[in-house]
Image (spheres, grey):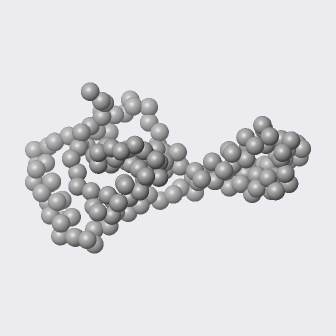
Amino acid sequence: MKAGRVVRLRVSPKDAMSVADLVSLHKMPTMGFSAAVSYSLAVLLETARSAKMLPVRDGFEYNELMEVFLPSQQGQGRKLAIAKQVEAAGSSFQVAGLAVPENAREPAKECNFQLAELQKKFFHDQWSAEDGQKWQELFPQVYPGEPIRLPDGTIVK
């Protein structure tokens, strides 16, 4: 038995297509739709954690955080009221995205920077001025406010 909570949910057509896109983008093997939704949620939550939009938790807070989802005496009535509100909104129901914090790193830029770092470290004999320029552009985007140490040891602020 796997750890975690089992949920039953409705996925909008727009989100269902995005799930298919994400699974295709990650070149995942054929899987059921439920597994694909679970995988997609895990990918998006990990992306939010790595961008510092969500905290990385150690698991000790699990019970405390899950308390708000425990069934209550008025739970069924509350569920029906929420369902009616969502149904009344129809196709105009919009989900707000997360606000990106000022200090969040962009995963694509960070990945490009790490690739440039590896090239600098392991293929320094093939390091070109163009590679150095790319590295200098990426460094302040990934590490804002940090001084730049050039390959020759020079520090640029």
For residue 130, above or below residue 154? below
Residue 122 in view of the camera: yes
At x 10%, y 54%, the residue is 77
Residue 145 in view of the camera: no
For residue 6, above or below residue 132? above
At x 31%, y 30%, the residue is 3
Towards the viewer: 80 or 37: 37
User: How far across and how far down the image is residue 108, in percent?
Assistant: 60, 53
At x 68%, y 55%, the residue is 141
Question: Would you say 99 lies left or right of 144 here?
Answer: left
Towards the viewer: 79 or 8: 8
Quarter of the image where the N terminus is located: top left
Q: Residue furthest front?
A: 30
Q: Residue furthest top?
A: 1
Q: Quadrant of residue 17?
A: bottom left
**Count of picture labels:** 0
User: How far across and how far down the image is residue 82, in percent?
Assistant: 18, 59
At x 47%, y 59%, the residue is 99
User: How far across and how far down the image is residue 52, in percent?
Assistant: 52, 47
Towards the viewer: 26 or 84: 26
User: How far across and how far down the image is residue 40, in percent?
Assistant: 39, 48
For residue 3, above or below residue 21? above
